[in-house]
Image: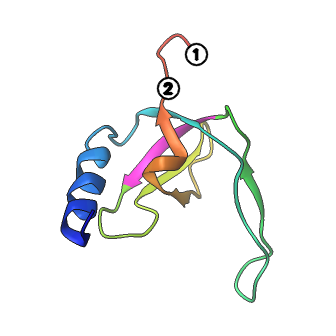
Amino acid sequence: MNAKEIADLHKAMLRNYSVGAKVRALGSLGDRADGDSPGGEYARRGDILVVRAIKPESAFPVSVSHEGILDRSFGVAVNEIEVADECS
């Protein structure tokens, strides 16, 4: 795939998500410690999260948080989440 095809696929995948939608973490989500962050695990595989914002030009374009957490969120890539079933 060339860069344009990858960008087009990325945009198409983003269309599956909308602000307020519930999504499921496909694996452990977090950061390693560095100078800007203590790091840590933000979500575990299977956790249900809520989409808080979509930033198409970001490397981690979908901002999510756990339900009830409204004062902070973290960014994830589209291949790290999936739309959660309504019955979950």
* Residue 84 disc label: 2
Q: Main secondary structure of the magenta part?
A: strand
Q: Residue at x 62, y 45 (%)?
A: 69
* Residue 88 disc label: 1
- Label 1 SS: loop
Q: How is the image coloured?
A: rainbow
Marks counted in the figure total 2
Q: Residue at x 31, y 48 (%)?
A: 14
Instruction: Assess disc 1: are there few (<14), some (14-19) or many (≥20) residues with their C-alpha within 10 Å of its C-alpha.
Output: few
Asked if the residues shown at circle 1 and circle 2 are in contact, with their CB atoms under 8 angstroms apart, the answer is yes
* Residue 27 disc label: none
The part of the chain drawn in magenta is 48-53
Q: Position of residue 16 (x, y in %)?
A: 31, 37
Q: Is residue 24 magenta?
A: no
Q: Quadrant of the N terminus?
A: bottom left
- Label 2 SS: loop
Q: Position of residue 62 (x, y in %)?
A: 43, 54
Q: Position of residue 32 (x, y in %)?
A: 76, 72
Residue 4 as seen in the image, left or right of residue 68: left
Asked which quadrant contains residue 49, the reply is top right
